[in-house]
Amino acid sequence: MYNKGPFADWVPKPLMLLLIIIFLFPLLAVMGVYSSNTTDIAGALATYSEYISLANNATTIGMAIAVTIALRIKMYFRSKEIIAGSAIVLAFLSYMIGVTDNPLVVVAGSFFIGFFKMFPIIEMILPVMFILSPSGDKGRFYAIFYPLSICIGQLSSYLMSDLIFNSNWQAPYFIMSILMLVIAALSLIFQHNQRFCFKMPLYQIDWLSLGLLAVSAMAFNVGLTFMRQQGWFSSPLIMGSLLMGILFLLATILRQKTRKRKLIKFDFIVKRVNIWHSLILLMILGVFLASSSIFIQYTVGVLGYNNLINSKLNLWMLPGIVIAGVYAFYSFKNKWNLRYFLASGFVAFFLHTLMLYLLIQPQMNIEYLYIPMVLKGLGMGILFIGIWFYASLNLEMNDLLGIIGILLMVRTFVATAFGGAIIGWATYQSQWQSLNDISMYLDLGDFTNGMSIYGTVQINAMLASLKIVLGSLCWVIIPILTFVLTHHYGQFNYRRLILFRKAIRGDSTKGYKFSD
């Protein structure tokens, strides 16, 4: 017998809805590295912060790898087996990271947490999709689900930060381990034993391609994450890891071309305009998201905030994310032009960057940073919804899952890591230049104790470098808006083109309409 619902027939519908919430929230929140404990875990393990960033990116890579085979896994296992089994594995992995003292264990555990969390999340997303959008309208679903998932991430980050501040860095892993075991127990009690559909074999999955893609992504992860720490391209480690990533990616693409059942149709990236254009937009978005490192340098290095205060400040992104969801809902409902919707997201990020550029100074009240965080949340919500909606146009579910893996990897890992490397390099060079400029004036003075002003000089050099980078990001909005506003986004109006051509030639357009 087949049953497409996740719970048994005897479970009341209100209880089903409550169980979906209980399942979905911890599954979305569980991570290998929580953004609020990166500095704490790096200090506790006495390791470079790059290892923790490596582990954080590994979670995304694991999710991207898992989503490519999610449909096969769903067709082979029962829903109860997927959720209960994955939850138990996630509990073990969380506990393993919580008790380890080896950063490589954190990296490996984070990868497998991302891999195994994706299967139960999809099990819960499918009923949520039907609840939020019974007609299958993607725009309506994205407008509600994306703000919800981003808000859950920000709230969980704050809760974990508060937990760490009042205990230690291991506490979130133990708490999430317990929650995963609770989910496994609830799954065994309330879920049915029926299948979603007919059973499909797992041997048809191209496991070698899956492994090649994972190795390629992790090689890029090492290269992009350690780029600054290893001296950029002068390091053999960086050059070797990037070359290794390229070679394994090419091997994956060539192998997929010869397979009958393709995991990822890489030719879609070239042939489908909406996919390659979305990848470019995601790379641009990654640069703006990576600019958060500038904000953290300012709040921690200059204003002296701790992780808990920064997490509270990030909560001001929630109003912007909610506004983005409402804006997207009415935009898709009224079929507004997608190019203006996406352009408004980049404008929100521009205003966020501009306000930071104008506000940065040695001393400032925290209240002045509330509006920039609202704008950041607004821009993030708009672009996450809009780019994902455009990328999924005219794609079947089987093709979409493979492409989603690439898009997810690019959006959350490649784009932010690449953007972080660029911004890190620019900040580093600008700070050295600022120190050099300041030292020229110091040579003209006579100081009885020159070392006493070292801290002030360092802070001034940091502020100057941050302003240089933020100012440069502000100017980037011009080519970005030009790129966005000149694309049709599947809404090309041939009638307007014909009438525009007539107007250029001097022909009469009397009696014609510019729209249907």
Image (cartoon, rainbow, N blue to C red):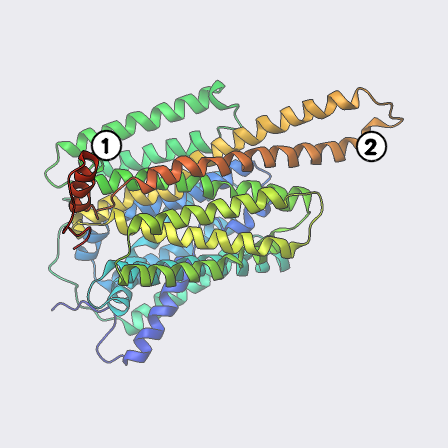
Q: Amino acid at mark 1?
A: Thr
Q: CA distance from mark 1 to mark 2?
A: 57 Å
Image coordinates of residue 219 in percent, x first then y, are 38, 31
Q: Amino acid at mark 2?
A: Ser
Answer left or right for 446 relative to 277. right
Residue drawn at x 16%, y 51% is 396
Which quadrant would residue 177 be assigned to in this image? bottom left
Between 206 and 263, the residue placed more toward the observer is: 263
| Callout 1 secondary element | helix
Tell us which disc is closer to us: 1 or 2.
2
Which quadrant would residue 240 be assigned to in this image? top left
Between 50 and 94, the residue placed more toward the observer is: 50
Answer left or right for 476 relative to 167. left
Image coordinates of residue 341 in percent, x first then y, are 34, 52
Between 64 and 442, the residue placed more toward the observer is: 442
Q: Is residue 306 visible?
A: yes
> Which image quarter is the C terminus in?
bottom left
Q: Residues within 10 Å of mark 1 (few under 14, many from 20)?
A: many
Image coordinates of residue 316 in percent, x first then y, are 53, 59
Which circle marks residue 252 in the picture? 1
In the image, residue 212 above or below residue 55? above
Circle 2 is placed at which residue position? Answer: 452
In the image, residue 260 above or below residue 79? above
> Which image quarter is the N terminus in?
bottom left
